Amino acid sequence: MIDKIFEGLIFEWKDGRAYHLDIDANDVTSYILTMGSHKRLEKIRECIEVVDEGGSRLTWIKGFYKDILIFAFNSGMGPSSAAIAFTEVLKKLYEGVRQGYIIRIGTAGALDKSIPRYSLVIPKAAVRNEHVSRYIVPASYPSDMDPVIYLTALQTALDNGFKLGENLFIGKVETKDDLYFQEGFHNSPLSDKLRQEYNAFKRMGVLATEMEVSLLPILRDYFKGLARRDGLEFHLYVGGILLTIGGELEREKISEEEDALVKIGLETLYNINRFLRGEYNIENILRYIST
């Protein structure tokens, strides 16, 4: 029998801080934004009153957006890197406040070509077409986002001028392992197989393809399982907000649209807090979803 390679759930320094993000339970707040890009993290820095920051291989900042304390971190690109970062943050959340609302903000490619470039896609569920989460639970297990996240994100986008069915969409997305040969199936020697797969996703109503969000519900359920085992309460809600890009890439335009994405992410967390206090109404969105 092979020996364990390391002890515990994650690599930690002697002082108990997580190895890649260099965080402890006191660093992580209940309102969390995550993204692959360090550049996007810097955009968040411009929108909050920073009170602390740090990191090692990956970086994080903490600060006030209006009157709520936000924790934001970059996870690197792809499910392998995201799984490392997400697990470190969730473990420290589990050791600390044990209540969290986590939103991934990032970019995606539209599978449905009726979705214009620079639209927002809000996932209700993710197709687990990546392999990392299969080391936690088989691929037949669903990856479903939490309604409090996607409903509030949808209402927040509407409040900020997005129009449902024009530049705002909600539904299923795909999470994949690779960009240039999986999504870019035309480059792959396996292009026929991959083309068939993506045609099937499109036919079944998958809106967009991205590289991290499916990990969040799987890890949410993993940590809730730990809480049941330990006899603890752990309230955790996850979701995503994705900006569709593609075609000829325009630096200034993408930067402008990412500014809007960051704003919607921050405002969604703020509105979740308002909703919990009874100050924000999502009845219209609940009515829309029910129909």
Image (spheres, rainbow, N blue to C red):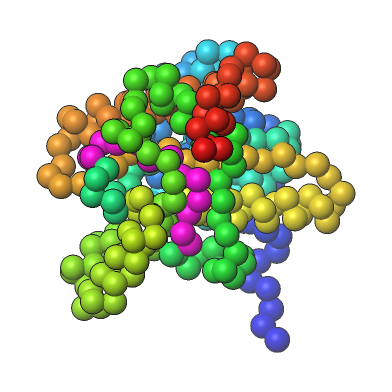
Q: Where 219 sits versus 139, above or below?
A: above
- Residue 72, percent from left and from top: 50, 33
Residue 274 appears in view: yes
Q: Main secondary structure of the magenta part?
A: strand
Whether the magenta-drawn stretch holds residue 119 is answered as: yes
Residue 58 appears in view: no
Relative to the observer, which residue lies in front, 107 or 94? 107
Give the total number of marks visible in the rendering.
Answer: 0
Q: Quadrant of the N terminus?
A: bottom right
Q: Is residue 123 left or right of residue 114?
A: right
Highlighted range, magenta: 116-128
- Residue 273, percent from left and from top: 62, 22
Q: Among all residues in the image, which is located at the extreme bottom?
A: 1
Q: Quadrant of residue 107?
A: top left
Relative to the observer, which residue lies in front, 98 or 23? 98
Q: Among all residues in the image, which is located at the extreme right?
A: 231
Name the residue located 56 percent from the left edge and 31 percent from the top edge. Answer: 286
Q: Where 161 sits versus 30, above or below?
A: above
- Residue 252, percent from left and from top: 17, 30
Q: Where 247 sits versus 183, above or below?
A: above
Q: Is residue 96 left or right of residue 77?
A: right
- Residue 108, percent from left and from top: 32, 47
Name the residue located 67 percent from the left edge and 83 percent from the top edge. Answer: 2
Q: Quadrant of residue 141?
A: bottom right
Name the residue located 48 percent from the left edge and 26 percent from the top edge. Answer: 155
Whether the magenta-drawn stretch holds residue 82 is answered as: no
Name the residue located 58 percent from the left edge and 24 percent from the top edge. Answer: 283
Relative to the observer, which residue lies in front, 17 or 89? 89
Q: Among all residues in the image, which is located at the extreme front?
A: 291
